[in-house]
Image: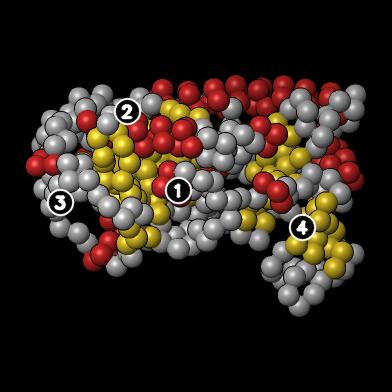
Amino acid sequence: MSLGAFGRIAAACLAGRSAWPPRAAVFLSRPALQCMCLHNSSQQQGSLPKTSLSQPPWPETILPDPVDESEHHKELVKKVNDLIAKGQFGRLFAVVYFSSRQWKVTNEDLVALDCSVEAKCGDRIRLEKVLLVGGENFTLVGKPLLGKDLVRVEATVIEQTESRPKIVQKFWKRHGYQRRKSLTVRFITKRFIGDYDPTLEMIYRHTAAMDGEFVHFEILDTAGQDEDSLQIEEKIKWGDGFAVVYSVTDRCSFDEVMRLCFLINHIHSNARKGTGDLPPVVIVANKKDLQFDRMVSTEDGEKLAKALKYPCYEISTRDSYEETAMVFNALYYELMKQGNLSPGSFKKRSVSKLMEKIPKLYANSTLSANGRSLSFNSFRDYIPE
């Protein structure tokens, strides 16, 4: 039985002092990529290690040998076909990009879409953008999409209304786990809030204890909207330290980590010419509690972090406040390596009109007179169609 037949099988079974605070930024790309940046205005020499993205020459992309790639592809297809022939494929699932969203789906489940489907009730439709398919003993990941000759994913339109056409997809969207998490909200409130409006952009000002001393944070939680390059650049310039956060349940967010790290280093290397300092960066793998939905292994995250020479943390914002706070602590200590964080070292820098327009919310009613100040922000970068 061919791998193409697997597609048919799948389709068949699928139907302080008041000194100016240093700032930090947190970036989030859909569906769950976050970056946190910690912004200190001092320009002192630091002790952070150089990374492969710090300065030219940038790392070259070495393409695999076509012959070796073809042989590897044939071997993989043969293994998957053998599993299918023996019926040892277990629970089939896939991740598809449809109606401007990613859907993790399995067989015999409903998905309601807020869009018009150009098909009548009872029609079969083919889902073109397949990011990943897998079973009990295999996973096929697209780069970025799986070829149409490799897998076929179909759905049946069972109902259409003026407001919400419904589709039976041979893959399942796990509604109970469809949640947007925010490191920022978890850190500030110490509570996990599974349902909040992620489109609201806000700068939170929060005080936390670090080594027996009060530290004042500014945390910018940005809206999940498309942003042009100028907006992204302004928000990256706003901070001095970053935590690039991806979801272990979303391979696309993991693939965005490298791009965001490059942007951070590239923009700050131009802005800090002659200082030798680049902002501290930590990589964070979120949603480790969703082992059933995991698409990025712990080893993959550690390997990427090692290649970039950044620390890596795997956390669950739902299960642990301590793990969430650890991310902010790591940014604070990494920034400490760049110099003295005494309040007097903070120099007020000019703020762009873009940043001035963002509303601010004080999360603490009182601030310590001998505290230090740090700040954070976030934005979402959408996966292209």
Write the residue at 41% across / 32% down.
326
Q: Nearer the viewer, residue 258 or 377?
A: 377
> Disc 2 or 4, which lies upstream in sequence?
2
- Report how far apart the C-alphas of labels 2 and 3 lie in the structure: 37 Å
- Report how far apart the C-alphas of labels 2 and 4 lie in the structure: 43 Å
Q: For mark 1, give the secondary structure.
A: helix
Question: Which residue bears the numbered disc 4?
Answer: 111
* Residue 318 on image: x %, y %: 57, 41
Write the residue at 47% across / 23% down.
303
Left or right of 82? Residue 352 is left
- For badge 1, the amino acid type reads Thr
Left or right of 230? Residue 119 is right
Q: Nearer the viewer, residue 57 or 226?
A: 226
* Residue 42 on image: x %, y %: 13, 41
Question: Which residue bears the numbered disc 2?
Answer: 52
Question: Which residue bears the numbered disc 3?
Answer: 18
Q: Nearer the viewer, residue 220 or 247?
A: 220
Left or right of 194? Residue 332 is left
